[in-house]
């Protein structure tokens, strides 16, 4: 008999072992997801959303904070194509700040000597 598993079953199994997320943490996380999703969509604006509808859909249907974190590059590319790189970089910095304290340390951007 083959054992089948996927990432979500592994995570749910670990959460049950560790007691899962409290409802307060879960609500905080969902509010953060909603706030970040809204900030990403607003930063793109209508012109970028119309030019890059797939990016808009991926943001709208992202499942969690990590999905949104990885979509920052697509958001930057869409904004840069419509408004220029300087504006895109500024908007992305504002979005990235919204993730502070919400992601594992390994996912957080490190300061770069090449920035600004």
Image (cartoon, rainbow, N blue to C red):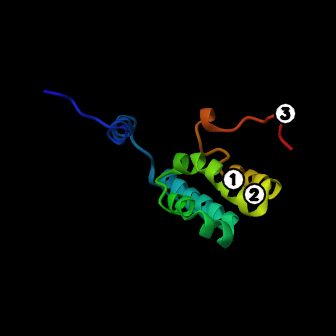
Using the numbered discs, state the Cα–Cα distance from disc 2 to disc 1 in whole angstroms.
8 Å
Percent x, y of residue 61: 47, 60
Of residue 14 and residue 58, the one placed in the foreground of this image is 58
Residues packed near mark 2 inside 10 Å, few (<14), some (14 to 19) or many (20 plus): many
Residue 3 place in picture, x, y as percent: 21, 29
Residue ID for mark 2: 91
Q: Residue at x 69, y 49 (%)?
A: 96
- CA separation in Å, label 2 and label 3: 19 Å
Return the residue at label 1.
76
Residue 110: quarter of image: top right
Q: Is residue 81 left or right of residue 106?
A: right
User: Is label 2 in contact with label 1 (beta carbons under 8 Å)?
Assistant: yes
Q: Residue furthest right?
A: 116
Residue highlighted by disc 3? 113
Ranked by sequence position, the earlier of labels 2 and 1 is 1
Q: Quadrant of the N terminus?
A: top left
Q: Is residue 74 left or right of residue 4?
A: right
On residue 10, the disc is none
Of 34 and 24, nearer the camera is 34
């Amino acid at each position: 008999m083959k054992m089948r598993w996927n990432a979500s079953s592994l995570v749910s199994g670990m959460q049950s072992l560790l007691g899962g997320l409290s409802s307060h943490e879960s609500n905080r996380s969902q509010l953060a997801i909603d706030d970040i999703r809204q900030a990403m969509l607003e930063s793109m604006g209508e012109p970028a959303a119309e030019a890059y509808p797939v990016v808009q859909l991926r943001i709208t249907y992202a499942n969690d904070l990590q999905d949104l974190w990885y979509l920052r590059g697509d958001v930057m590319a869409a904004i840069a194509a419509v408004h220029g790189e300087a504006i895109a970089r500024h908007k992305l910095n504002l979005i990235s700040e919204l993730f502070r304290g919400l992601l594992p340390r390994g996912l957080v951007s490190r300061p770069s000597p090449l920035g600004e």
